[in-house]
Amino acid sequence: MTNSINEFEESDAYFVIGSNTTEAHPIIALRLKRGARFHGAKLVVADPREIPLTRYATLWLRHRPGTDAALINGLMHIILKEGLEDKEFIQERTENIAALKKVLKKCTPAYTEKVTGVPKDQLLEAARIIGTEEKVAFFYAMGITQHVMGTENVMSVANLAMLTGNVGKPGTGVNPLRGQSNVQGACDMGGLYNYYPGYQRVDVEENRKKFSEAWQCDTLSRDPGLSATAMVNAAIEGKVKALYVMGENPILSDPDIGHTEKAFRNLDFLVVQDIFLTETAALADVVLPATTFAEKDGTFTNTERRVQRVRQVIEPLGDSRLDWEIICAIAEKMERPMRYQNSAEIFDEIASMTPLYGGISHARLEQGSLQWPCPDADHPGTPYLHKGKFTRGKGFFSPVDYKPPKELPDRAYPFLLTTGRMLSHYHTGSMTRRSGGLHELCPEGFIEIHPQDAKKLKIAEGEEIRISSRRGTVTVKAKITRRVPPKVVYMNFHFAESAANRLTIAALDPLSGIAEAKVCSVKIEKMQPKKAAL
Amino acid sequence: MKVIIDGKVIDAKPESTILEAARKEGVHIPTLCYHKKLSPYGGCRLCIVEVEGIPRLVASCTTPVTEGMVVRTDTEQIKKVRKTIVELILSNHPNECMVCEQNGRCELQDLAYEFGLKEIRFVGEKNVHPIQNQNPLIERDYNKCILCGRCVRMCDEVQGVGAVDFSQRGFHAKIATEYDGVLSCEFCGNCVEVCPVGALTGKISRFKGRSWEAKKTKTICNYCGCGCTIIMHAKDGQVVRVSHSEDTTVNEGCMCVKGKFGFEYINHEDRLKTPLIRKEGKLQETTWEEALGRVAENLARIKKEYGSNSIAGLSSAKCTNEDNYVFQKFMRTVIGTNNVDHCARY
């Protein structure tokens, strides 16, 4: 996030696209709800589904799944046409507006309505809110990123924010909502194939030299690494022989898990370090018992770049060990020791190698959390980014032209399946489904289907039905609801018995390697009546 | 703005109430319905004070300060009225502190103690409500409810859900759901957090330990990326409850259903407690020595045979920064590859 959570009650308007905020980020949603209800902020929600946030919305744009960039382009077209853009901001702080204007030329309200399904008058109203309100904050999540044009969708949001001058001041900004407690931190720490810690590129020789010296290692690879999705393909091709998985469950979370399963079975050696025997761990050659956050000391970095202290609550259960201790023990056995006394010492090394974290230490965090960039011990941290100037100097408009999703409904697979998260469950369910109360709130998966479609297919509420895509088949109970539009069905991916990701497609965004988990096509069939048991 | 409270001249913010101004100066005024996150309600009348020029006692939580206001918070009359209020509440409150989950953190109990109420002068009719617990997480025992309305305001003003409200009048007044149906809400548990008594309690924490027995640790929630500060209560190596922290950075003391009630997995019997190794096609329990040996041996063999880039690693968005840093350093130095990623994209 460019901005901070506690700024959003001051915003004048919100534009939320591809984020089921009340269910996936409930605490951030509280700010938006309060802003909209008590401070007169205008809330514009763009989502194909009737998510709970639409109840609080000034305006709900129900665009077709996968048409996000077309929708945003349409809004920008209107903003420019009505002269609502922030001319001063564009002039002083950005470049390449001409190229953007060129692409937007064709994105008239009529064209946008045709592509997205959003009526013209709603487009006009939304554009006027975004164009005229003083402080507009933009929010998005996986709803716009899990597409073949995921990166470009993000660029579209950035274009819209810059066009209206909503960057670099409190209560505004481009705010991706990150789905897991430390997904921001895992990226910051270099848990990425192309970056060392702190987004220092691995293909810059100077960086390689810096880390070689600090880590006293002259064998740091010059080869580009593989992204998670590329690792799966490389394992199928036999190029990746061994995989070390720490605290992840790709056999349920990956798109097209049939493909991932095939890849994992093809490995020579799989080691999984986790707290439960997950679907992924069940395939492993060695399973190493790790600890939960309640047994750990360390730090998490949240979605607004806030580094906070995680403190040990209980002793590790049984013979389980801390994740970093296990890794160090393997390193020791492989005769390249990595030795640390405690997590504070590791953090000091992080700070010494990562300018963004340079001024942070466990001791300092005891006095309160800090938001990066925090380059030195006297720096107070950074609540919002791009004040006065972008990281690259001027903000660059990257025009985006809408491309349809890879797989759209056809005669054989006539429904569009979209997937997501729900309030009472988390990711692959390994934690929440083992938390009695949460599990009881929603013990099994379901598929949302519009009453019109259910009627046509003669499907009753709660009926077990068969859903198939070109990649797999699952059976799941039907939930008949107008939350989804006709011809669109929706599933959560938390449930192994009805794994939505057996159906999803691993079509990748060439820029980021993210898969299009939000759009694929499926067919729906009634189950054969069960034969009476003999 | 100058205000005189108990003879002391204080500088109060113009928009503040008498209660806020007094508390800021450390003056003790008891309350039950007041909650700093919620709108003032003036229901319990415990915060009454004397204001010069006003012939009756006023609720300090709803009365704004004015220039030169002279306030007394602790006269004999005020004490008498407050004590009577607590007695009246207790006259319609079950005396079952011994088994009440709120014992030790109950605001009513604290007030009974403050006023030394060994006996209640008033004996009369008591409300009898069935216990409402037809949901997995929150038990509502309205026999203990004191009608402070904090849950109603929390649900409406903060959570924006409005699952409960007052119903009926006078002695029959109660907190109810729509048509007295089962509780249908987001189960954020913020009502449980603000309930001053034992009327709203978390079902999964029941009988897992008295409030004072638990070791309380301030940490960060492990679910979504909001990064809420929470307080985990643990007893005998088991996490038994999660409560809010007054921390103002991200969540301002609020939680969601996962943060508040999603902790049972931590001590779940399915937790892996020993390393497992595949022998004859099956995963079997083993020692750390053998498991680590097998990992090191195989990674070394594959590295030697097929090169560093034949090995890949997935680190975790659920692990700490320190874990992730060490993991990528291991992949880059010990293995010698940049094949490291995690599920940031799922």
Image (cartoon, rainbow, N blue to C red):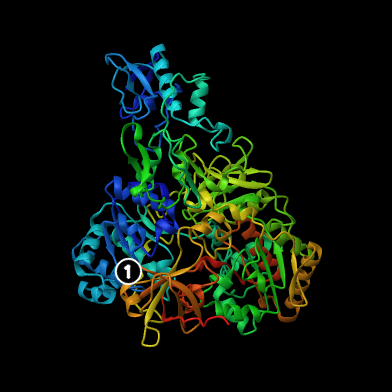
Which residue is at the far front?
Answer: A534
The image quarter containing residue B156 is: top left
Q: Whole-percent x and y of residue A168?
A: 37, 53
Q: Amino acid at mark 1?
A: Asn
Report the number of numbered marks.
1
The image quarter containing residue A264 is: bottom right
Q: Whole-percent x and y of residue A77?
A: 24, 69
User: Mark 1, chain letter?
Assistant: A
Instruction: Judge whether residue A404 can be spotted in this image.
Output: yes
Instruction: Judge whether residue A105 can be spotted in this image.
Output: no
Placement of A314 over or under B344, stated as above or below? above
Q: Whole-percent x and y of residue A495?
A: 52, 68
Q: Would residue A154 be found to the left or right of residue A322 on screen?
A: left
Placement of A402 over or under A72, stated as above or below? below
Placement of B127 over or under A471, stated as above or below? above
Placement of A314 over or under A205, stated as above or below? above
Near mark 1 (Cα within 10 A), the count class, few <14, some 14-19 or many ≥20, is some
| Nearest the eye: A505 or A305 | A505
- Residue shown at 23% from the left, 76% from the top: A111
Q: Whole-percent x and y of residue A55?
A: 31, 57
- Residue shown at 51% from the left, 61% from the top: A426
Q: Which residue is mark 1?
A: A96
Q: Secondary structure at mark 1?
A: loop
- Image quarter of the N terminus of chain B: top left
| Nearest the eye: B64 or B202 | B202
Q: Would residue B34 be found to the left or right of residue A121 on screen?
A: right
